[in-house]
Image: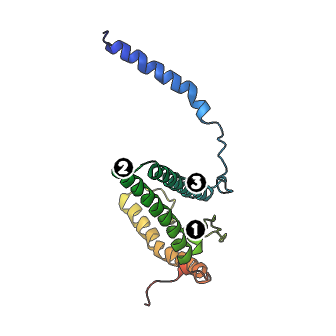
Amino acid sequence: MRQFSSRNHIKILLSAFILFAIALPVLALEVNYPTVGGQTPGESLTGYIRYVFIFIASLAGIMAVTVLAIGGVQYMTSVGDVAKMKSAKSKIMSSLFGILLLLSSYIILNTINPNLTNIEEPTLIQLASVPLPVAPISSVPTADLLTRIKILAEDTRQVPDIIYNTAKVISGYTSSCDCDNTKPMCSC
């Protein structure tokens, strides 16, 4: 048996790196996803989330039905062997429990809020832009450090007023919104 030296390890790693570097552009090609439940992933994140949700639910259902069929065939072919019958019954019960769990989770989520099972892309409203507060800094160059500190202190005193005025503008926007996201949670 021939042993590999560190030189051979470096050659193998370098070859693998070169092959990966050559194959990397191929990995960036467009992928054609299959249609699952009438859905294909869209261009947005919510499209992919919806697609993955439907894909996983469909896959779980297919697996449960397959295990149910396998368990049924095993039960029919057990021919009185108690261990095989017990194993087949266990598979049948587990698959029925899986199907029941899958369906009941969908029903519960849909009963609580139908939007939990209907994943849609959120729509955002465009707000008017609010200029960010900028602390006024004097452009007077000074060599005296104490004078520069006094100028900065005077400029800094104006910042709370700018922040207060900006907060009033933002409060005006949020008070005109009628959604529950901007209402306070407490009764104070």
The amino acid pointed to by label 2 is Asp
The amino acid pointed to by label 1 is Thr
Closer to the chain start, of discs 3 and 1, is 3
How many neighbours does mark 1 have within 10 angstroms: few (below 14), some (14-19), or many (20 or more)? some
Q: Position of residue 70 (x, y in %)?
A: 49, 49
Residue 164 higher or lower than 53, as above or below? below
User: Is mark 3 in CB contact (under 8 Å) with mark 1?
Assistant: no
Closer to the chain start, of discs 2 and 3, is 3
Query: Circle 2 is placed at which residue position?
Result: 81
How many neighbours does mark 2 have within 10 angstroms: few (below 14), some (14-19), or many (20 or more)? few
Q: Quadrant of the C terminus?
A: bottom left
Q: Position of residue 179 (x, y in %)?
A: 59, 80
Which numbered disc covers residue 55?
3
The amino acid pointed to by label 3 is Phe
Q: Position of residue 100 (x, y in %)?
A: 49, 66
Q: Residue at x 58, y 78 (%)?
A: 169
Distance from label 2 to label 3 (Cα)? 38 Å
Q: Residue furthest right?
A: 38
Q: Position of residue 9 (x, y in %)?
A: 37, 17
Distance from label 2 to label 1 (Cα)? 44 Å
Residue 161 higher or lower than 24, as above or below? below
> Which quarter of the figure has residue 178?
bottom right
